[in-house]
Amino acid sequence: MTQTSLTRSYVGKGKVYAGLKAGGANLPLGNVSKLALAISEEKKELLDYTSAGGGMKDTLTRISSITGSMTVHDYSPENLAFVLRGEVDTQATGSVTNEASHTAYTSGFVEFAYVPDVTATVTPVIDVTATWAGEHAYVAGNCILANSDVYQCTTAGTSAAGEPSWAGKSATGDTITDGTVTWTNRGAVAMVDGTDYTLGKAGLSIDADATRFADGLPIKISYTKMTAEVTQVLTQAAPEYILFFDGLNEADSGNPFYVKLHRVKFGVTSGLDMIGDDFAGLEVTFDVLQDTTISGTGISQYLKIAQVAA
């Protein structure tokens, strides 16, 4: 049965695709709630200066710009890269053993280098491999392992020639003088979930009651990293795109309403909502530019609109 338009009233729905002007796949942008064009017109007026009555002698109007806006609701890695001029880095699953270069502070957050699988085992420990050395210069924050406990230098100085007795200072928070150095007992190397930290989605939150981390302690973490896609933002120049609206007119029995914008340059999104009660959207604006590669009588170098005939 041939499709025929019965009304020119319009309620639009459909899918939006964007493809690089330089070539490649035209990729879907997912759930788009708004796609709109705004056309600005420049007008020049010439008054009649030949008589006292005045009036308008002539006018000239021309299009000064065609701009567009859309709201994209899919926070996919590809869409985030698209609206933030970024690129997507794929992270493979695997085991991470003794990830170091972390310092944990009371009430602080410790970020993992990769997205962790929080359903698998996560093992953070205080990262101490050094043992006590006599007549050695220590700076505040240095940590050693002695008598199975971590001792942190809280007063810088030089250790004595003979090793102090650690056995009498085995409680967390105990201090011991060693030459001009003061050591403070920071407890066992192992960290306890619920006492020392709480596991989050991408790191550890050191508990407020975990006072042994008050001056910061080096830690290392073993965990399983998940397969993940990481969007690195603002790493690319703004490329040019072709934009397709594979749409329909809901008011006209779902008949096709197809739009192709031949050359488009997007701005970055005006905002990135991350906490809220409503569904978030990526607000994006763009310029519709002239495509001089298109030629022919009556053929637009900007855009075309196709719909079913009446």
Image (cartoon, rainbow, N blue to C red):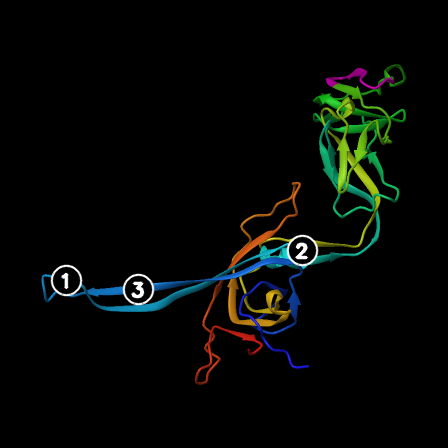
Under circle 2, the secondary element is loop
Give the amino acid type for the residue marked by disc 1 in the picture: Gly
Q: Is residue 90 above or below residue 18?
A: above
Relative to residue 239, is residue 107 drawn left or right?
right
Q: Is residue 131 above or below residue 75?
A: above
Q: How far apart are the alpha carbons under marks 2 and 3?
A: 40 Å
**Which of 121 and 175 lies nearest the eye of the viewer?**
121
Label total for image = 3
Q: Residue furthest bottom?
A: 297
Q: Are dots 2 and 3 in contact, CB under 8 Å?
A: no
Q: Which mark is residue 43?
A: 3
Q: Which residues are magenta?
A: 170-181
Q: How far apart are the alpha carbons under marks 2 and 1?
A: 57 Å
Q: Is residue 54 at least partly visible in the picture?
A: yes
Under circle 3, the secondary element is strand
Under circle 1, the secondary element is loop
In which quadrant of the rendered image does the C terminus lie?
A: bottom right
Residue at the image point whose x is 14% and y is 62% from the top: 54
Identify the residue position indicated by label 1 in the image.
Answer: 54
Task: Tell me which label, 3 or 1, sits earlier in the chain.
Answer: 3
Mark 3, Cα crowd under 10 Å, few <14 / some 14-19 / many 20+, is few
Identify the residue position indicated by label 2 in the image.
Answer: 74
Task: Tell me which label, 2 or 3, sits earlier in the chain.
Answer: 3
Mark 1, Cα crowd under 10 Å, few <14 / some 14-19 / many 20+, is few
* Quarter of the image where one finds residue 217: top right
